[in-house]
Amino acid sequence: MVQELAATDVSGVAGYGNWEKRAELIARRIRQLEPKRVRFGSDGFGGGNVAPREAWAALWRLPLSDDEFRVIAAIIAPYMR
């Protein structure tokens, strides 16, 4: 049996409030967690949530490398396989 690493959802870390002021800190925390342990998920639009497309676009404005973004984008939740 393959053990999967615990993952952290980052769909709400960018796009809400004044997140741009904390972009460097957010990127640093993602690196501490390791990008391979980061997933982008969404509760969907409504109820005060940012639309998934907007949240995804905001995430890509973080100061992460292309390789870090590729790792995050490639992760697929087990229930989506």
Image: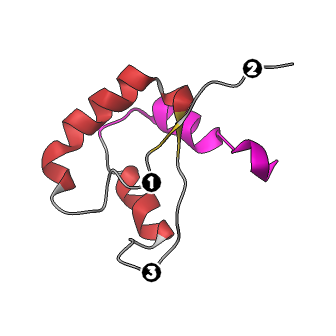
Q: Which residues are magenta?
A: 63-81
| Residue 28 pos. (x, y %) | 28, 28
Q: CA distance from mark 2 to mark 1?
A: 24 Å
- Residue 58, percent across and down? 35, 58
**Magenta segment, principal secondary structure?**
helix
Residue 15 on the magenta segment: no
Q: Nearer the viewer, mark 2 or mark 1?
A: 2
Question: Neighbour class for label 1 at 10 Å: few (<14), some, many (≥20)?
Answer: many
For badge 1, the amino acid type reads: Ser
The residue sitting at 43% across, 46% down in the picture is: 10
Q: Residues within 10 Å of mark 3 (few under 14, many from 20)?
A: few
Q: Is residue 67 above or below residue 16?
A: above
First-in-chain label (1 vs 3):
1
Residue at the far bottom: name it: 46
Query: In the depicted view, which residue is nearer to us: 60 or 37?
Result: 37
- Cα distance between the residues tagged 1 and 3: 14 Å
SS under mark 3: loop
Find out whether the residues at labels 2 and 1 contact each other: C-beta distance under 8 Å.
Answer: no
Q: Which residue lies at the image location 44% right of the left edge and 80% below the top edge? A: 46
Q: Secondary structure at mark 2?
A: loop
Q: Which mark is residue 11?
A: 1
Hey, what amino acid is under mark 3? Gly
Q: Nearer the viewer, mark 1 or mark 3?
A: 3
In the rendered structure, which disc, 2 or 3, sits on the residue that comes first in sequence? 2
Find residue 3 and name its label. Answer: 2
Observer-nearest of 71 and 8: 8
Q: Earlier in the sequence, mark 2 or mark 1?
A: 2
Q: Which residue is mark 3?
A: 46
Q: Please report the residue visible at 31 percent of the width from the left and 44 percent of the height from the top.
A: 62
Q: Secondary structure at mark 1?
A: loop
Which amino acid type corresponds to the residue marked 2 in the rendered image? Answer: Gln
